[in-house]
Image (cartoon, helix red, strand yellow):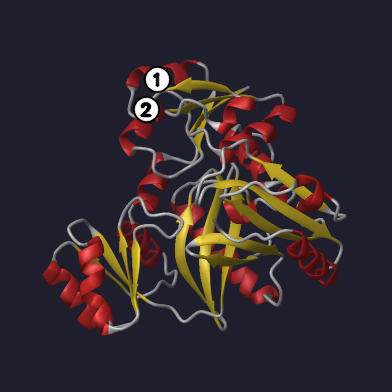
């Protein structure tokens, strides 16, 4: 089988690595001169709206997927008319616009923060009057890793927020005083079978994922089942195929949806060593029509992103149970260049290993 992938970053790289043992070859479309996926897959260089490049990808692919959600929807539809594409362009469309996404959640009965559409300054003033402070002003499209947003903690920050982000489609969201951030990765096959990875607890710093622990501590069966129920509503409504990530704010017993990603997700990287079948392999299996693998954990995992700098590999790998994934990227400020996972038998052992890992390396975002 032949799998085409839109986007040539680390997620495509890890998908291609998971596909290889299954006898599936990957070809990637990416506009950059030297995408990090190039070490493990064939690359077609071209823009995502270049019909000639898209046609080339279609000709060498039995199925197509994508590694990021900002692929132009019309281009995805053009491809999907020629080659089966999973997840569908409809999933892309929902996830690309925060107003559409929040409205979609609300329609399915999934709790969200209070939100309002903001197109003009008058809309902004009305939204602030209704939602109040604190609140978060965000661009409706193309925001990631903390970009394109402004936290309005006090009324005197209203004007600076508008100066920074005004003049484009925005969303104002009520600030959620959450206990912690969680994510649920689910996968749905082409026959409609759904499976779920354990809830992961995520720590963000400066808008970027710093650390993820899975399974998250003290979630309980009821909270996990509620997250799975909400995810299944999304999967079913979109007739979804592949891995879906939903990020949550936990406020006591409540789960409040932050956003969804119709793709493999950073908080699931620990599944490579920490689960029976990784998110990457399960995504490839689902898209290519193969049976899903088990999502059961094989231990307790901790993930740390490497952002902006290269570590001393030898020092990190001295710790038993530690695994290094280097993406082959040149380190630049705020660029994810790799990740480290540690997998242990118990949560207590994991916590001890995390302390040891932090003594060996400074995982600060650079």
Q: Position of residue 186 (x, y in %)?
A: 60, 54
Q: Nearer the viewer, residue 346 or 222?
A: 346
Report if the CB atoms under discs 1 and 2 are less than 8 Å apart: yes
Which SS class for mark 2? Answer: loop
Whole-percent x, y for residue 117 in the image: 23, 65
Above or below for 256 versus 325: below
Left or right: residue 265 compared with residue 270: left
Q: Quadrant of the C terminus?
A: bottom right
For residue 160, above or below residue 326: below
Disc 1 versus disc 2: nearer the observer: 2
Residue 285 image position (x, y, % from top left): 65, 37
Residue linked to disc 2: 47
Question: Which mark, residue 284?
Answer: none
Q: Can you say whether 121 is above or below 63 in the image?
A: below
In the rendered image, which quarter is residue 165 located in?
A: bottom left
- Label 1 sits on a secondary structure element that is helix
From the viewer's perspective, is 2 left or right of 249? right
Q: Nearer the viewer, residue 293 or 278?
A: 278
The residue located at (67%, 41%) in the rendering is 326
**Dot 1 surroundings within 10 Å: few (below 14), some, or many (20 or more)?**
some
Residue most toward the left? 122
Looking at the rendered image, the quarter that the N terminus falls into is top right
Q: How many marks?
A: 2
For the point 24% across and 71% down, the residue is 160
User: Which residue is the site of mark 1?
Assistant: 53
Q: Earlier in the sequence, mark 1 or mark 2?
A: 2
Q: Is residue 35 left or right of residue 217?
A: left
In the shown orientation, is residue 272 left or right of residue 25?
right
């Amino acid at each position: 089988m032949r799998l085409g992938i839109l986007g040539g970053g680390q997620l495509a790289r890890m998908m291609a690595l998971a596909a290889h043992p299954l006898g599936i070859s990957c070809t990637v479309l990416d506009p950059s001169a030297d995408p990090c996926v190039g070490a493990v897959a064939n690359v077609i260089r071209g823009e995502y709206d270049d019909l000639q490049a898209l046609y080339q990808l279609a000709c060498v692919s039995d199925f197509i997927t994508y590694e990021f959600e900002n692929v132009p929807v019309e281009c995805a539809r053009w491809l999907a008319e020629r080659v089966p594409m999973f997840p569908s362009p409809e999933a892309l469309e929902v996830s690309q616009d925060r107003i559409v996404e929040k409205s979609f959640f609300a329609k399915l009965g999934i709790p969200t923060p209070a939100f309002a559409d903001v197109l003009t300054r008058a809309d902004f003033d009305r939204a602030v009057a209704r939602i109040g402070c604190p609140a978060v002003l965000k661009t409706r499209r193309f925001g990631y890793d903390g970009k394109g947003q402004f936290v309005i903690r006090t009324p005197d920050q209203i004007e600076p927020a508008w100066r920074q982000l005004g003049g484009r489609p925005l969303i104002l969201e009520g600030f959620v005083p959450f206990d912690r951030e969680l994510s649920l990765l689910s996968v749905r096959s082409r026959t409609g079978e759904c499976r779920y990875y354990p809830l992961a607890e995520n720590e963000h710093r400066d808008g970027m994922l710093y650390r993820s622990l899975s399974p998250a501590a003290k979630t309980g069966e009821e909270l996990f089942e509620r997250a799975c129920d909400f995810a299944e509503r999304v999967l079913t409504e979109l007739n979804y195929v592949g891995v879906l990530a939903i990020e949550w704010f936990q406020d006591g017993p409540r789960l409040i949806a932050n956003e969804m990603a119709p793709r493999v997700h950073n908080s699931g990287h620990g599944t490579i060593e920490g689960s029976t079948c990784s998110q990457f392999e399960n995504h490839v299996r689902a898209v290519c029509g193969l049976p899903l693998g088990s999502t059961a954990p094989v231990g307790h995992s901790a993930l740390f992103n490497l952002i902006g700098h290269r570590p001393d590999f030898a020092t990190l790998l001295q710790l038993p149970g530690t695994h290094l994934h280097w993406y082959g990227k040149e380190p630049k400020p705020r660029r994810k260049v790799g990740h480290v996972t540690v997998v242990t038998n118990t949560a207590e052992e994991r916590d001890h290993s995390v302390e040891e890992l932090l003594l060996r390396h400074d995982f600060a975002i650079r």
